[in-house]
Amino acid sequence: MTEHSPCPVQAKFWTPGVVLLAFLTGCGAVAAAARFIGGIGYVSHLSTARPWGLWIGVDVASGVALAAGGFSTAALAHIFGRHQYEPVVRPALLTAMLGYTFVVLGLLVDIGRSWAIWKPVFNWNLNSVLFEVAMCVMIYLHVLYIEFIPIVAEQFKGKVRIPGPLSALNPLIEKLLTVADAVLDKIMWIFIIAGVVLSCMHQSSLGSLMLIAPTKLHPLWYTPILPLLFLTSAFAVGYPMVVFETTVITSSLTLDSEMEILTPLTRITIFLLGLYMLLKIGDMLYRGSYVYLLDGNAQSNSFLAEMIFGVILPWCFLLSEKIRKSRRGLFITCAMIVGGVVLNRINVFLVGYRPPLTQTAYFPSIGEILVTVGLISCLMLVYRAAVTYLPILNASRKEVQV
């Protein structure tokens, strides 16, 4: 691929796929409105005995993990000086920013009193892991938006033309964009480092949440090193998520595949995923939890699926240079890693978690599914709008071979 500076994609926005995403977003909005009007019990199968479900397992825990590509690519390009990966930094940053935004929206739907979500800012509980997660996510979300400001300034600086009575604001907006771009250019390294540190903190702390539930979480997942496993799995899924979303967007918009960047990037994943696999298997052997592997129940089967199809097989695939250089092969392999991490979070927070007061097995209601599908569709819709109208992607437009 020839060198290209980031630029908006010159493509039709309202395609059949975008219309479908808008429809699913609307369905999710209706379900969310029903939740706030009628209460959580009106649209979900949650109860006092089963206080969390799909919204925590997928919208929050999985969303946070899959947004790890933002801090991992920023660290690689800006902290470790691997500037050849710059073309994928902006898409990864956009994915992280939108991912964390929708994590917060998912929390607003899930928590009982959403209007009180601001209280941890003023009521500190320094002994609470959840407090640390809340503060890190809140601060990191602001860091992501600050990192995104130069992209917006690049697109609109010198182009602000507000008509009518508000036209007097044009010079002020232009001045703000110019100053913001100049100032952030000098201090952006502070926010990049802060983003990496904050993300590492709360990625591990999400695992720490379950350390207080040794009798509720199945032995296949409960371990004292659960925070370390959550952190290393986030590292492992960061670059595969970049490959996944880059391949999807370049394929849908018929753009350059950027394989000369994605192939070397996945070589790093061999080490990161291998480290996670080593920790996971070593911990299982050390604790003796392997005795549960052949129980034949939902927990053991889900654990085996997570490990075989989400960790072991894709790690073996990445060892093949032929697969790493194949666009289809690399996409499938990275999709397996992404699916494995999502399944891990679902297993920890849903499949392997059994509250003692629960009398019946949990399965999400139609309302819960609609909210989740709506949030994911809205994320994809906003992502498509961002790459269409803002300088995010570096790929040039041409036919690609899969």
Image: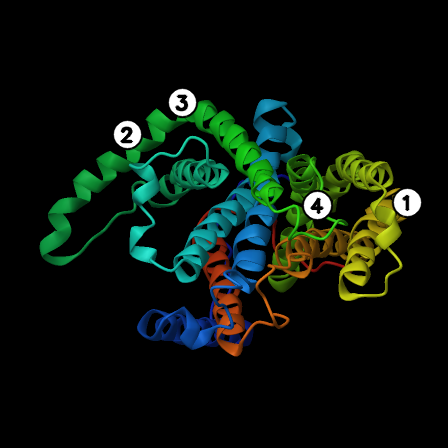
Cα separation between marks 1 and 4: 33 Å
What residue do we see at 83% from left, 50% from top? 314
Residue 17 percent across, percent down from the top left:
55, 73
What residue do we see at 40% from left, 70% from top? 32
Q: Amino acid at mark 1?
A: Ser
Cα separation between marks 4 and 3: 41 Å
**Label 2 secondary element:** helix
Residue 294: name its quadrant. bottom right
The residue nearer to you, when weighing 376 against 202, is: 202
Task: Give the labeled residue for mark 2.
Answer: 179
Q: Which mark is residue 187?
A: 3
Task: Give the labeled residue for mark 4.
Answer: 222
**Label 3 secondary element:** helix
Q: Specify whether residue 18 is in view.
A: no
Mark 4 vs 2, N-terminal side: 2
112 vs 318: above or below: below
**Label 1 secondary element:** loop
